[in-house]
Image (tube, rainbow, N blue to C red):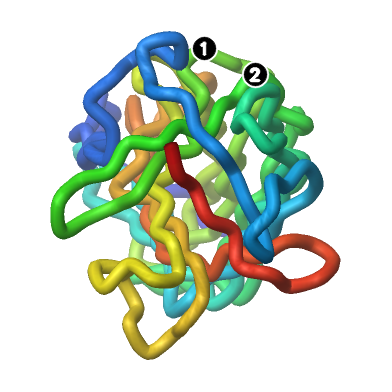
Amino acid sequence: MRKPLRHLATGTGTLLGAAALVAATAGAALASATVTAGGSPYTGAVRATNLGGVTYSIGSSYGVLIATCTGNQIDATTTGSGAASTITGVSFSGCSLNRGGTVTITAHGLPYAGGAVAYAPVPGGQDGTFSFSAPNRSFDVELDAYVAQWNNAHVNCHYSVSSTPFAIGLFNAGNAARPVLANAHSQAVLNHQTLSSISSAPLCATAASWSGTYQLLTQPGGADVSVGP
C-alpha cells in the first residue's frame, strides 16, 4: 500500500535551466536551411537516438527530482528546405530516480507540427537548429513516479511548450565541435530545454528541464543528416 506524503510544502518550485541553443524566439526570424543526406537534399523521416543518459528534472520546495533514462528516441520529419518539420514520436525507457522509487515518462499529443530547421552556425558549436516557436499545450510530457525518499509519494506531472521555444541543436558529422567525438555521425542536443507545467498537482514544479545528446540519422537508411545554407 502506498503511503501518503506528509508535511509537504507546495511552493511553486525552482526553474531548472532554459533552452540556450538558439537566440531567436520565432521561427520566422531564423535563417533558412538546406537539409541534406548523402549529399542530396533530403525530405523524409529522421531519428534521434540518445548517446548516454538523458535527464528529465523537476524541482519543488520539497526538493529536486531527476529522472535519468538510458533510452530516449525522438522521431521527426523534415524537408530539404527545413520547412514544415514535425516531431512524430518521442519515447523514454530505462528511467530511474535520484531519490529512489519508480518512474515512467510518456509523451502525448503528437505529432507536433510547425517546426523548422535553420542554418545557424556558432563558432566552436552547432551548425543549426530544429525548433518550434509556437506554444503547443497539446504536446504533453508526463512524468509519473512513486518516490521512495518522499515516503513513496505518487508524483504525476504534465509539462508542455509554453513561452520558451522548443529548440534542438544540430551538429553535422564533420563538425569537430559535435558533443560526442567518438561517434562519427551527425548529432543533436537538448540543452536544459524548459517545459512549462500544465498540471496543478501539489508535487509538480512550474517547469521541467530536459537534457540529452543524440545521434541523428535518416530513418530508414541510417544516413547522416547535414544542415547548411
**Disc 2 element:** strand
Report the amino acid beneath label 1: Ala
Where residue 158 is drawn, which disc sits there? Answer: none
Q: Crowding at label 1, few (<14), some or many (≥20) Cα neighbours within 10 Å?
A: some
Residue 189 on image: x %, y % = 39, 56
Q: Quadrant of the C terminus?
A: top left
Q: Is residue 46 above or below residue 30?
A: below
Q: Is residue 30 left or right of residue 142?
A: left
Q: Crowding at label 2, few (<14), some or many (≥20) Cα neighbours within 10 Å?
A: some
Q: Please tell me in which quadrant of the rendered image residue 9 appears.
A: top left
Q: Which residue is mark 1?
A: 134
Q: Is residue 91 above or below residue 143?
A: below
| Closer to the eye: label 1 or 2 | 2
- In the foreground, 206 or 149: 206
Q: Residue at x 52, y 20 (%)?
A: 198
Report the amino acid beneath label 2: Gly
Q: Quadrant of the N terminus?
A: bottom right
**Disc 1 element:** loop
Q: Residue at x 59, y 44 (%)?
A: 35
Question: Is disc 1 in contact with disc 2, using a CB cutoff of under 8 Å?
Answer: yes
Mark 1 and mark 2: span between their CA atoms? 8 Å
- In the foreground, 187 or 74: 187
Q: Please tell me in which quadrant of the rendered image residue 162 appears.
A: top left
